[in-house]
Image: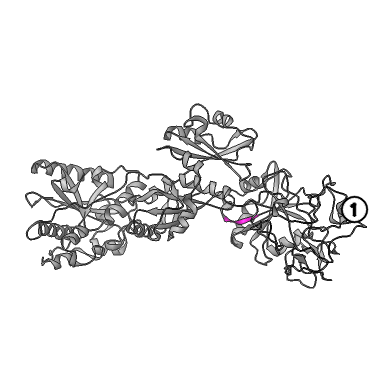
Amino acid sequence: MMASHSDTLVVFFGATAGANGGKLGSDEREIILLVWQIVDLHEKKVGKLQKCLVRPDTLELTDQSKDETGLTVDDVVDAEPLDKVLQQFQQSVASELKCLGRSSYTLCVDSPLIIRQALHPEASKKNLILPECFFSFVDLRKEFHKCCPSAGPAHKLEVSSMSEYVGLPDVSEPLMGVKEVRNMVQLVLCILDEPHNHKFSCVETVKYKFDSGTCSKTEPVDNETVIRARGLPWQSSDQDIARFFKGLSIARGGVALCLNAQGRRNGEALVRFINSEHRDLALERHKHHMGNRYIEVYKATGEEFLKIAGGTSNEVAQFLSKENQVIIRMRGLPFTATPQEVLSFLGPESPVTDGSEGLLFVKYPDGRPTGDAFVLFSCEEYAQNALKKHKQILGKRYIELFRSTAAEVQQVLNRYMSTPLISTLPPSPMVSVPVLSTPPFLPTASTARDCVRLRGLPYTAGIEDILEFMGEHTVDIKPHGVHMVLNQQGRPSGDAFIQMKSPDKAFMVAQKCHKKTMKDRYVEVFQCSTEEMSIVLMGGTLNRSGLSPPPCKLPCESPPPRVCPPPTAYAAFPTPPALLSEAALYQPPLLAAPRPPQTTAHSPAHALAYYPTHPHLYMNMNMNYTAYYPSPPVSPSTVGYSGALVRMQGLPYNTGVKDILSFFQGYQYGPEEYSSVVQMSEQARSLVQPKEWLCL
């Protein structure tokens, strides 16, 4: 309904049970007062002023509201609820238009707050369907600025200052709402008349629904249009977030759900609005509620939004090119699942758009499946039928199904396809690679009790089993904070350590998860520190009577034990002991900072980084291995070591470093220093095939 084609304006005003004026709607209070009056644009006449009280669901008014509106709880307790008052509004306006012989009207407000920040959010929470007239309006401040640009910026104008600018007297009226409407009507008639002859034409609209879509990494995004929302329910979709910001215009595809290190939603989203005005209104909804949860809203940048939502994959673009599709994410699929098996699992009641073409399996860069997939459905009904399959079994695994978004598809694909398999790979295979002082994600020792130890895990338990066991507490796990402890044979020990975001979070997990069952076994959950965790990983024990140090410390001149990737998607890394505070009891860790490479007459020209020989370098032969998550395996041959490397296959599972050194007894090792890979003499290399490798 275009204002330029409307016969009348309905000057509209509202007040809430809380903050009003420039802060209207910022405190989530309900509307308690609506006032309106019709202005005939052709005859320049006005109708009867109408005033309606509204009964809020929460019968409580702030002192500020009582002072400004002059209303009390007794005044509104017998009033009609909002939906009834809106019906009365429609009937009243329609009746007056009929008497005037007019057929159309447009709302006129003194600022967008009553429409965008009060009426639409409240109607959304109460599941009310607003009449069409509330989806378009004209802002008197912007219309006046067009008419009198020298009056100042539109966002700083007020009814009183605009009236003063054109020489209109202030209406003498004690009642809030009545005074504002009469002043606005007086101002409208003034700018309609000579010498202004203004035509109302700048219509603002409220979107009926959120438009999903994709975003390219090359697309410019204004920093003043993006916010970060935190504290979202983990199952929230982009439509849920758009509903939270109802009344404000989100850009197409402007909702990006954030994922944690485990690929799960972390309760955050980046939202991009059409302009800075809508972004600023969104910031006013800080700590408003979505269900029973309050949502924090902060400023964010365009770079952050593109990092999450931007994509370059042609496969994703093609998958999302179909219009008006509902996206469902499937998680936990068997790695061997085929498109036909997935289609059969979803069933005929939820047909996938274009069959297997509507399936997108997420894979690692080397082609291995991740267990995630996205599915397109042509309508909401089919998607709802699919969601009923949540946690049903496919093969031997239960499948999780969630509503998803185009931005989440981009983010998940970006996460798996653009990240190197191991983040410590060298930039070039021909460049000398210094050995890292510690493996990735290894925590530094601390006495802060921000970890939990899980003891008694089933030996078949995997990372996903642990995350399911922890339930709602998974959102509080630090990135790369899941450490599964393996024994000396590289098999699960039944223990795991979880790093939480704070000691309080660790305490809550220990309280709520202790002795919960996992696969028919109860699991003990204890709060501990990273220092205690390090001792256990060195081979010591952790019990209620205190800490016991590792049973032995044998001097060893070789580098750390070999990394043995398990036959899953998660690699096992050797865990060096962390540097503990009891320096006298526990020796410094083996993985000290390497010294720069040196080239001598006895060392090859392509020298690697060596560990310096030192009498105080010790390694515990009972050291546990730890499987970090997520870290897909990769062949060390891709690192690009050159020279005398050998590989041993067929080792017994209980083989240790001492056994390997004994096997090569009598053969000459490399220089006097020892690198991260064993350097062998020509005599030793003759035992094995060339270009093979050995990692200790």
The question of residue 170 being in magenta is answered with no
Q: Position of residue 437 (x, y in %)?
A: 71, 64
Residue 62 in which image quadrant: bottom left
Query: Could you tell me how many numbered marks the image carries?
Result: 1
Which element type, helix, strand or loop, lies under badge 1? helix
The question of residue 481 being in magenta is answered with yes
Residue 296 in which image quadrant: bottom left
Density class for disc 1 (Cα within 10 Å; few <14, some 14-19, many ≥20) is few
Q: Position of residue 110 (x, y in %)?
A: 22, 58
Q: Position of residue 78 (x, y in %)?
A: 25, 49
Q: Residue at x 50, y 30 (%)?
A: 355
**Residue type marked 1:** Phe
Colour theme: one colour
Magenta-colored span: 476-482
In this rendering, position of residue 144 left or right of residue 248: left
| Residue at which label 1 appears | 663
In this rendering, position of residue 198 left or right of residue 424: left
Q: Residue at x 53, y 34 (%)?
A: 389
Residue 554 in which image quadrant: bottom right
Q: Quadrant of the N terminus?
A: top left
